[in-house]
Image (cartoon, rainbow, N blue to C red):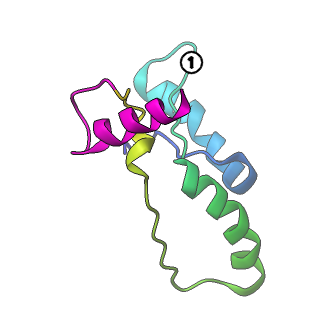
Amino acid sequence: MDPDVPLLIPEVNAAHLDAIPVQQKNRGYDTGFLVTNPNCSTAGLVLVLKPLADAFGLEKIFVVTLQAISGRRLSWRSRDGYPGQRRFLSSAAKKKK
């Protein structure tokens, strides 16, 4: 990540919005700006961790997230994807008929 592009989670780090005017000046932007947002698991996690960190402090956390193969949003007709996925999805579609 570029130092002047904030990772923005407004409920947690609204102060990162202060980086936007600096970014606009550094990059010569008259309008607009760049921000990044967290992925879905991080967004939910930090909303819970922020008040805990403020109240008790946090030294370390360990998080594991898993993505289902079906989360790749591939059509069952796709030639890409996990081996066997097409066969599974194809047989599931036939069962619905």
Q: Which residues are magenta?
A: 77-97
Does residue 4 appear left or right of residue 48 in this picture?
left
Does residue 7 appear left or right of residue 16 in this picture?
left
Dividing the image into 4 quarters, which one contains the C terminus?
top right
Write down the quadrant of residue 91 in the picture.
Answer: top left
Q: Is residue 3 visible?
A: no
Q: Nearer the viewer, residue 36 or 76?
A: 76
| Relative height, residue 52 to residue 26 (above, below) | below
- Magenta highlight on residue 96: yes
| Relative height, residue 23 to residue 50 (above, below) | above
Residue 6 placed where, x, y %? Answer: 52, 43
| Relative height, residue 32 to residue 41 (above, below) | above
Q: Residues within 10 Å of mark 1 (few under 14, many from 20)?
A: few
Residue identifier under label 1: 32
Residue 87 placed where, x, y %? Answer: 29, 38
- Report the amino acid beneath label 1: Gly
